Image: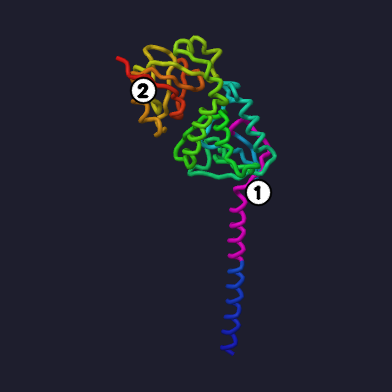
Amino acid sequence: MGRARKATKARGRMRFDRKALLAFLFICLLLLFNDLGEDQALVVDVIDGDTIVALTDRGQRETIRYLLIDTPELHHPNRGREELGEEAKGFNASLVLNNKVRIELDKQERDKYDRLLAYVWVDTSQGERMVNEALVEEGLALPYIIPPNGKYLNAIMEATKRARSRNVGLWKRAQGRIFTPDQIYSELPYLAGSFVTIKIKIDKIEKSGSRWILSQGKSKCRLVIYDNNEYLLPVKDSLIGREVKVVGKVAASHAGAEIVISDPAQIISKSPAFR
């Protein structure tokens, strides 16, 4: 009698263990399939050159900000619509709108606006293409570095060189617009948001918060290099005492006008040091 009870209990435990194991395997498979699908999304809206809205395979609606690039603004509350903003949005839409894309994340997955930060890949007739890189290569974006994300930074920087070499997009626009710092400041209402070439004699470099300010005399138009850009920090010291030409976008600031240097390719010429 006692042996029978023990055998019955043992069989019950085996059935329970088998059910638990099957449930565990089912959960693992479910998680696996979800993980395989979460990097796929259908793009349902294009906000601007570097921001889209997509539906993931899980049915979630995500706003996705492209990593490592910055396209001209279209909806900024202070800057309004910037030069090449519509072109960047149109090119972005031509690649991704109503298409399935592959979403690849980096170390930091979201920004302070809860947007997903990603590299976005799309299938083309030439194979899979990174949209972030394509926008830079067409001269519709410049590098934009926010650590710790940086997996494809070298690819983005190489795309910047190719865009400059091909003289497309912002590079072509800036080619015939060569201004001194004083000229840019005096025409700031008309030049803000536009791409230009600034010709500046850098005689002062100073730190201000997280930024390095490169300026000429008392001019109210300066160059800016952010402290988190490890590729440019060594370059800045070589610019002191030189006349340089830099391609970039004019922005209004509380101190006047400024142009951010985010990639060494923006420095298109550098004179010998002057006394």
Along the line of sight, which residue is nearer the eye, 155 or 164?
A: 164
Indicate the quadrant containing the C terminus: top left, top right, bottom left or bottom right: top left
Give neighbour class at mark 2: few <14, some 14-19, many 20+ (Cα, 10 Å): many
Q: Residue at x 52, y 36 (%)?
A: 112
Q: Is residue 43 magenta?
A: yes
Assign a secondary structure to mark 1. Answer: loop
Assign a secondary structure to mark 2. Answer: helix
The residues colored magenta run: 23-50
Q: Which residue is mark 1?
A: 57
Indicate the quadrant where residue 98 lies.
top right
Give the amino acid at mark 1. Asp
Q: Is residue 269 magenta?
A: no
Mark before the other along the chain sequence, 1 or 2: 1
- Image location (x, y in percent) of residue 274: 32, 16
Q: Residue at x 49, y 15 (%)?
A: 178
Indicate the quadrant containing the N terminus: top left, top right, bottom left or bottom right: bottom right
Q: Which labelled disc corresponds to residue 239?
A: 2
Specify whether residue 72 is in view.
no
Give the amino acid at mark 2. Leu
Query: Seen from this angle, which residue lies furthest bottom?
Result: 1
Q: Is residue 23 above or below residue 190?
A: below
- Image location (x, y in percent) of residue 189: 54, 12
- Image location (x, y in percent) of residue 27: 60, 61
Query: Seen from this angle, which residue lies furthest front?
Result: 166
Along the line of sight, which residue is nearer the eye, 92 or 54?
A: 92
Instruction: Please tell me whether mark 1 or mark 2 is closer to you in this view.
Output: 2
Q: Is residue 59 above or below residue 19?
A: above
- Tag 1 and tag 2, C-beta contact below 8 Å: no
Give neighbour class at mark 1: few <14, some 14-19, many 20+ (Cα, 10 Å): some
- Image location (x, y in percent) of residue 35: 58, 53
Indicate the quadrant where residue 74 lies.
top right
